[in-house]
């Protein structure tokens, strides 16, 4: 059996005096490895809400993110 993974990323930001904007991004990968998370979130810092999968831990630490549970 082959599994396919869609990584759903949602960005919502509100700036004072500016319009709100929302972005939804879906990324396809053929695995759920930490390498995918590392590349996908490279340079991003902020809040990352996940399902608790340990593959996110290195990415969260490297990018100084705040890790939120679902």
Image: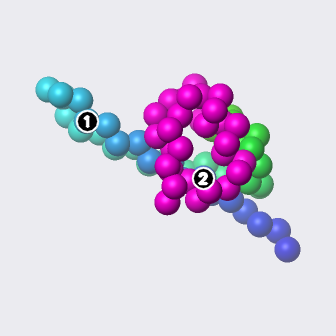
How busy is the neighbourhood of tag 1: few (under 14 within 10 Å), some, or many (20 plus)?
few
Q: Position of residue 59 (x, y in %)?
A: 66, 36
What sort of colour scheme is used for the picture? rainbow
Task: Name the quarter where the N terminus is drawn.
Answer: bottom right
Label pair 1/2, CB-CB below 8 angstroms: no
Q: Helix or strand or loop: what does disc 2 sit on?
A: strand
Classify 16 as above or below 13.
Answer: above
Residue drawn at point x = 49 percent, y = 60 percent: 70
Q: Position of residue 52 (x, y in %)?
A: 62, 56
Q: Answer left or right for 63 relative to 66.
A: right
How busy is the neighbourhood of tag 2: few (under 14 within 10 Å), some, or many (20 plus)?
some
Classify 8 as above or below 23.
Answer: below
Q: Nearer the viewer, residue 42 or 1?
A: 42
Q: Position of residue 67 (x, y in %)?
A: 53, 44
Residue 47 painted magenta: yes
First in sequence: mark 1 or mark 2? 2
Q: Which residues are magenta?
A: 41-70
Instruction: Tell me how far mark 1 sits from mark 2, CA to CA.
Output: 23 Å
Whether residue 29 can be seen here: no
Whether residue 15 can be seen here: yes
- Say which quarter of the image contains residue 5: bottom right
- Say which quarter of the image contains residue 2: bottom right
Q: Nearer the viewer, residue 13 or 56?
A: 56
Residue drawn at point x = 70 percent, y = 37 percent: 58
> Circle 1 sits on which residue?
14
> What's the mark number on residue 54?
none
Q: Answer left or right for 31 relative to 44.
A: right
Q: Answer left or right for 60 relative to 22.
A: right
Q: Nearer the viewer, residue 4 or 32?
A: 32
> Circle 2 sits on which residue?
7
């Amino acid at each position: 059996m082959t599994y396919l993974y869609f990584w759903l990323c949602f960005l919502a930001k509100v700036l004072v005096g500016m319009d709100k904007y929302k972005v939804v991004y879906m990324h396809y990968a053929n695995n759920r490895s930490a390498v995918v998370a590392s590349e996908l979130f490279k340079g991003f810092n902020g809040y990352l809400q996940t399902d608790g999968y340990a593959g996110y831990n290195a990415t969260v630490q490297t990018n100084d993110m705040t890790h939120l549970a679902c």
